[in-house]
């Protein structure tokens, strides 16, 4: 089995340049595309412009602590957020943010711990990616069912078909034309709504 690597768009947010340099050094290679920000307000602007797979915040920031930024990132899209918090604030921050899906990492930390945290965040992002694909597939299937049902109801109302006859008519129309049931149903809907 071959493992296919995905690429990750990452946002590093820290008021301290040394933190950004240290974490950036761990992100060498083509796996990560990294943007940097020095404040929560700048990070929010970047998040509006670009979807990020992972956001890492080194708290505190110059304009806010950073926990709200991480919670918002986790809640509003499929971003995995990691928050580096000092030992004296760790427990409180963890209690507030972990239930929102934010990874909280102790500071000071080691290079190995940061590397492990990044690996865990990548794993979490992959799991979300799988869930996103399933959700899109399910939504597409539900949309198809809605369209087919609408076509069937139009056939029942206008042609006096039974539900089974209408269903068979949509299926046969799709098969005869070599198209999907969804397209056949849409053609039926369009013909009655002209």
Image: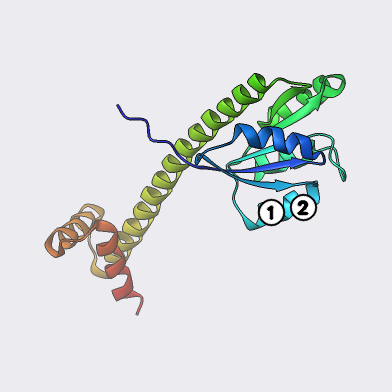
Residue 23 in the image: above or below residue 135: above
The tag on residue 118 is none
- Residue 67: image quadrant is top right
Screen quadrant of the C terminus: bottom left
In the image, which disc is placed on residue 42? Answer: 2
Q: Is residue 42 left or right of residue 34?
A: right
Q: Is residue 1 above or below residue 62?
A: above
Residue 186 in picture, x, y percent from top left: 31, 66
Assess disc 2: are there few (<14), some (14-19) or many (≥20) residues with their C-alpha within 10 Å of its C-alpha. Answer: few
Q: How is the image coloured?
A: rainbow
**Can residue 87 be seen at all in this image of the molecule?**
yes
Percent of width and height locating residue 32: 55, 41
Of residues 14 and 174, the one nearer the viewer is 14
Q: Which mark is residue 46?
A: 1
Going 59% across and 35% down the picture, which residue do you hit?
27
Where residue 46 sits, quadrant-wise, is bottom right
| Residue drawn at (24%, 65%) of the image | 160
Q: Residue 56: horizontal and vertical position, in percent?
A: 69, 36
Residue that lies at the very extreme toward the bottom in this rendered image? 194
Q: Is residue 96 left or right of residue 8?
A: right
Q: Residue pushed farthest left?
A: 176
Quadrant containing the N terminus is top left
Using residue 81 as the reference point, say whether residue 157 is left or right of it.
left
Give the answer, above or below, for where 178 lies relative to 193: above
User: Are discs 2 and 1 less than 8 Å apart at CB?
Assistant: yes
Assess disc 1: are there few (<14), some (14-19) or many (≥20) residues with their C-alpha within 10 Å of its C-alpha.
Answer: some
């Amino acid at each position: 089995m071959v493992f296919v690597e995905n690429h990750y768009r990452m946002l590093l947010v820290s008021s301290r340049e040394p933190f950004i340099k240290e974490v950036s050094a761990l992100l060498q290679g083509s796996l990560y595309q990294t943007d940097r920000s020095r404040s929560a307000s700048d990070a929010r602007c970047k998040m509006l412009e670009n979807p990020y797979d992972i956001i890492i915040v080194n708290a505190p920031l110059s304009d806010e602590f950073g926990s709200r930024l991480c919670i918002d990132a986790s809640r509003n899209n499929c971003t995995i957020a990691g928050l580096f918090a000092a030992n004296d604030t760790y427990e409180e921050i963890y209690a507030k943010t972990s239930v929102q899906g934010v990874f909280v990492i102790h500071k000071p930390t080691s290079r190995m711990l940061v590397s492990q945290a990044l690996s865990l965040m990548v794993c979490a992002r992959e799991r979300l990616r799988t869930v996103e694909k399933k959700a899109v597939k399910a939504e597409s299937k539900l949309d198809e069912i809605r369209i087919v049902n609408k076509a069937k109801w139009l056939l029942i109302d206008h042609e006096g078909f039974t539900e089974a006859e209408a269903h068979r008519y949509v299926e046969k129309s799709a098969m005869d034309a070599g198209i999907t049931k969804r397209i056949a149903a849409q053609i039926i809907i369009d013909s009655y709504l002209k």
